[in-house]
Structure formats: C-alpha cells, structure tokens
Image (cartoon, helix red, strand yellow):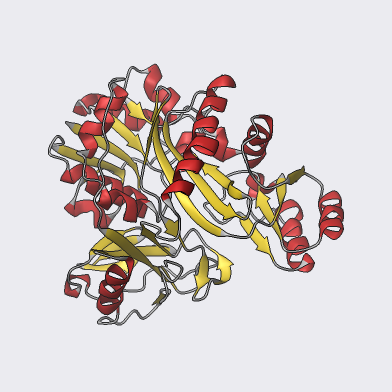
Amino acid sequence: MKVLVIGRGGREHAIVRQFAKSPSVTNVFAAPGNDGMREDAEVIAIDEMDFAGLADFAERQGVDFSFVGPEQPLSEGIVDFFEAKGLRIFGPSKAAAQIEGSKAFAKELMKKYKIPTAGYETFTEAAAAIAFIRQHGAPIVIKADGLAAGKGVVVALTEEEAVNAVNDMLEGQKFGESGSKVVIEEFLDGEEFSFMSFVCDGQIYPMVISQDHKRAYDGDRGPNTGGMGAYSPVPQISQAIIDETFTEIVEPAVKAMASEGTPFDGILYTGVILTENGPKVIEFNARFGDPETQVVLPRMATDFGLFIDTILKGQPAQLEWDNQAVLGVVIAADGYPETVEKGALLPDLAKLSGVEVTHAGTKLSNGSFAGNGGRVLLVSASGASIQSAQNKVYEQLETLHWDGFFYRTDIGWRAK
C-alpha cells in the first residue's frame, strides 16, 4: 500500500515510522514532513492546509489512504474535503473535530451525557470571568476555548495568576480568536493519563495508556508546554481504572457524538485524571497526542497499515501490544514555550546508541541538524521496565552537549 501522512511534527514522524515498519506498506509520503523524516518517508513540499494540493497528490500517486496528524487541518475540514473527492482518509469530520476545536462544545457534550469531568463555566467577558475567579478562589484552571497548540491551558495556583490568564486571553488576545472565549474549570487533583483510541464506524479500539509531562522544568515546575516527555505503560494506573475509563468515558463519548449527529471517526484522545471520585475527563482531542504517540506507537505489535486499511473497510480488526515499556524525553530550544531562537546546531545525533530519535522541529543545515522550532526532538528507548527505559535514554543524552537546548531530567518520575 501507499500511505500519505499529513503533518510535520514529532507525532507525525512517529506515525510515519510506524507505517514504514508495516509489512503491508510499500511507500510512505509525508506532507510537508520535516528533514528528519527523510529516512522513513518521501517528504513532499505540500502544506498541511493546502487541501486541494494534498488531495491532488493522493489521487495522482494512487495513495491507498491518507492519515492526518495535526488538529488544524482536521478542524478546518480536510476529511470532508477528501471524502467529497472519493479519497480514503482516516480522521474525524469538521463537525466531529469540534470535540477538540471547542472546549465549550466538549464540556456541554459531557454535561448532557453525564460523562464525568470538572465543573465549569464559559465566559467571553473578562469582568465576569474575574468575578467568577474571585468567588471560587484558586487553584483553578483557565482554558482558551479554541486550538492553541497545546499551550492554551493555565493551571493557576493563585487568583492573581488566574486573573492574568483571563486578561491575556480575553483582553490581550494571546491566542487570537481561539481565546475569545474561555472555559474556567474547577481544579482536579490526581494522577493523569492519556487514553487514546482508534474509532471507526462506532467500533472502538483502545490503545495502551501513557502519561506525559506538561510542565517545562523538573519537578513539574514552570509553564505548561505541549509536553516535555512521556512514557508507557503507566504502572500506577490499574487495569480496573483503565476498564472503568473505557466504559464510563470513552464508550459514552463515542455514542454521544453519534447521537448528536456528529459521529466520530479517527483518533479520540481522552486526557484523564484519576480523582478520589474516580476517573474524570480533562480534555478530548481529535488526534494523536504529542509526545504520547512517540511512546505508544512503538509498542504496537500489529501491522499499522493493515490495521487502518481494515477498519476503513468496515471489517473487524485486532490490535496487539508489546509488553516492553517505552520512555521518551523531549529536547526543546532554550526559551520554550515562549520565544525561541531557531538555528542552533544540534550535536551529532549519530553518536546516540540504542535509542530512537524522533524529529519534531529540525532542519538540515550544511549536513547537520539545527533547531527549527520549540520542541526539536524526542529521544526514546524501550526496556523491560520504565526504570530501564529511563536509564537508557538519560545515559545517552548525557554523552552529548546540548548547547542552546534543554530537557527535563526526571521524565517518568511518577511511575511507581
């Protein structure tokens, strides 16, 4: 089969690599891809928002199906565009992608169908939002309603921090149109995990769970980022809790979307927190998580290409997973998640041994890789346990000098 992967980041590199490993797949195209993907795919210079260009390429090349990585093209309707042209593509429709594209839509869906989540209110006016914060106190969570590249969430530990976040979003337009409405939620305390599922024609195929680390610095300190590392499995979350999450959250959410006339096909990402009252939803996304994909997909023992082809045909499929643990550490440019300088040269990645390097924001410069974004790479390893995978990654990272970059030294610390 020929497969087209749409997107350019670390998540897409992990998807590309998994298709490249599939015996059923002969050609993998990545559009627009990045320079680090060239070992695993043919990189095509077509922007992920150029729907006509992508569809034309898929048609001309006889692509068997396309797979969408990032949220933006999904929210703008790429799946509807491809399907209108009779092209097979895996992902949710524009209407279904609202589950990520509007936090208010997702919260209202959960309220209506009694899916456990944090209490919330929605605001478009700063004064009303601030009055709500003053009334409820901190800690409290402020979320931009729309897409904000994983950075539109502020877990405010003080009222002033919450007020500043509201002013940044509603008055300062920090996230543009995405922050013209905010959702303010009660703070939930507990262990977080990411539960991703393949969904097609009402059938749900759950993946193994993972946990990512959102804060920029060691000890879960500093600003929220798109994720500084992840690991799978999550030993502190029992199988009973995983099963409860599936039956009380994931299944009802898929049924709710169908009942609302917006049936969901694609990757349903459920961000979950295990509270003293059981698992509750933090957020839904309409695509693979990043960096969770980079530690979940390597554990897949099933032929990825054949699996997607089979479920797109409406046929029953099986998913098998490796028992090995995988842990990945993000290398980010200095200054991330705020302003970063691009162009700093990375050390010689060929010197790393026994680990996998997934490229997110890199560019080839005179034969060497340079940083070309905030999150630049993810370096991962597998092992019999989280501890052994963690040891492998950090032993290798310490062999190189990362001038102009930084990484957390404690990814996986919560695993018990």
Q: Quadrant of residue 199?
A: top left
Q: How many marks?
A: 0
Q: Residue at x 87, y 54 (%)?
A: 131
Q: Is residue 294 left or right of residue 279?
A: left
Which part of the image, by quadrant, shows the N terminus? top left
Q: Residue at x 50, y 42 (%)?
A: 244
Q: Is residue 46 left or right of residue 161?
A: left
- Residue 94, given in percent of the width and then of the height, sits at 51, 28
- Residue 286, given in percent of the width and then of the height, sits at 48, 38
Q: Nearer the viewer, residue 144 or 281?
A: 281
Which part of the image, by quadrant, shows the C terminus? bottom left
Q: Nearer the viewer, residue 126 or 192?
A: 192
Q: Is residue 7 left or right of residue 17?
A: right
Say whether residue 57 is visible.
Answer: no
Q: Is 345 drawn above or below residue 43 in the view shown?
A: below
Say whether residue 353 is visible.
Answer: yes
Q: Is 84 drawn above or below residue 182 in the view shown?
A: above
Q: Residue at x 65, y 56 (%)?
A: 188
- Residue 366, given in percent of the width and then of the height, sits at 22, 68
Q: Nearer the viewer, residue 416 or 363?
A: 416
- Residue 113, given in percent of the width and then of the height, sits at 64, 30
Q: Is residue 223 left or right of residue 134?
A: left
Q: Is 237 drawn above or below residue 404 in the view shown?
A: above
Which residue is the extreme one toward the front?
A: 240
